[in-house]
């Protein structure tokens, strides 16, 4: 039973445009117990119309897809940089200014504790801001692209 399943998986060719041919065959058995040689899969010949790979590349080059990616980058790059600077500032202050970080704020709570809890708080705030940004600025356009792509690939040869 296992040998049959191994034979089937080794003979199955993926028609996924994102399939990495260079990584295929790593750790996959060829059905005889030895590893299958890694190599490029056979070229996909569409039965009618465009192939799925052509459709995905066409969608990727479209202005609508590029706009979704621009909106994503406009949020992610500044948010990542701001959070990274905030994190590094905390670490640098902890190492270079232990007296400042040990200064009490209220009772046994010191500056380091407040800043450390601030790290958690900003993580949650950033997650919420990302979810809101995605919902308001990208989700509708991405969903439209997804439906359009599925409609186009429905008739493509597989």
Image (tube, rainbow, N blue to C red):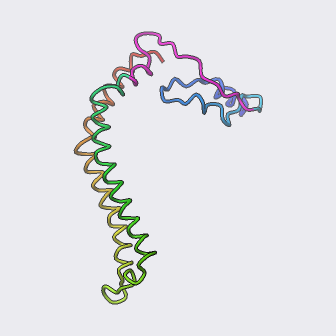
Residue ID at (30%, 30%): 145
Q: Which residues are magenta?
A: 35-57
Q: Looking at the image, which residue is at 32% across and 43% down?
A: 73
Residue 11 placement: quadrant: top right
Residue furthest top in the image: 48
How far across and down, in percent of the image, does residue 94 sit?
43, 75
**Magenta segment includes 43:** yes
Task: Name the image quarter holding the N terminus.
Answer: top right
The secondary structure that dominates the magenta segment is loop
Up-down relation of residue 24 to residue 83 (above or below): above
Furthest-bottom residue in this view: 107
Tell me what residue is drawn at x 70 percent, y 27 percent. Answer: 37
How far from the left and from the top, in percent, is residue 125? 29, 61
Question: As rendered, which of 148 and 58 lies closer to the eye?
Answer: 58
Q: Residue at x 42, y 19 (%)?
A: 54
Q: Is residue 25 above or below residue 76?
A: above
- At which x and y percent is residue 126? 31, 58
Is residue 93 shown in magenta?
Answer: no
Q: Nearer the viewer, residue 64 or 100?
A: 100
Between residue 31 and residue 25, name the one nearer to us: 25
Residue 156 image offset from top left, x and y in percent: 42, 16
The furthest residue to the front: 96
Hey, which quadrant is residue 82 in on the image?
A: bottom left
């Amino acid at each position: 039973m296992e040998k049959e399943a191994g034979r089937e998986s080794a003979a199955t060719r993926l028609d996924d445009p994102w399939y990495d041919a260079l990584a295929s065959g790593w750790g996959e058995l060829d059905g005889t117990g030895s590893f299958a040689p890694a190599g490029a899969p056979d070229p996909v010949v569409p039965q009618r119309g465009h192939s799925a790979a052509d459709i995905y590349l066409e969608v990727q080059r479209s202005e609508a897809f590029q706009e979704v990616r621009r909106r994503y980058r406009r949020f992610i790059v500044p948010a990542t940089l701001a959070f990274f600077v905030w994190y590094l500032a905390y670490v640098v202050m902890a190492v270079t200014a232990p007296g400042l970080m040990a200064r009490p704020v209220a009772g046994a709570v010191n500056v380091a504790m407040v800043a450390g809890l601030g790290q958690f708080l900003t993580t949650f705030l950033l997650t919420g801001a990302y979810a809101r940004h995605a919902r308001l600025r990208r989700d509708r356009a991405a969903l439209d692209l997804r439906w359009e792509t599925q409609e186009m690939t429905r008739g493509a040869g597989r």
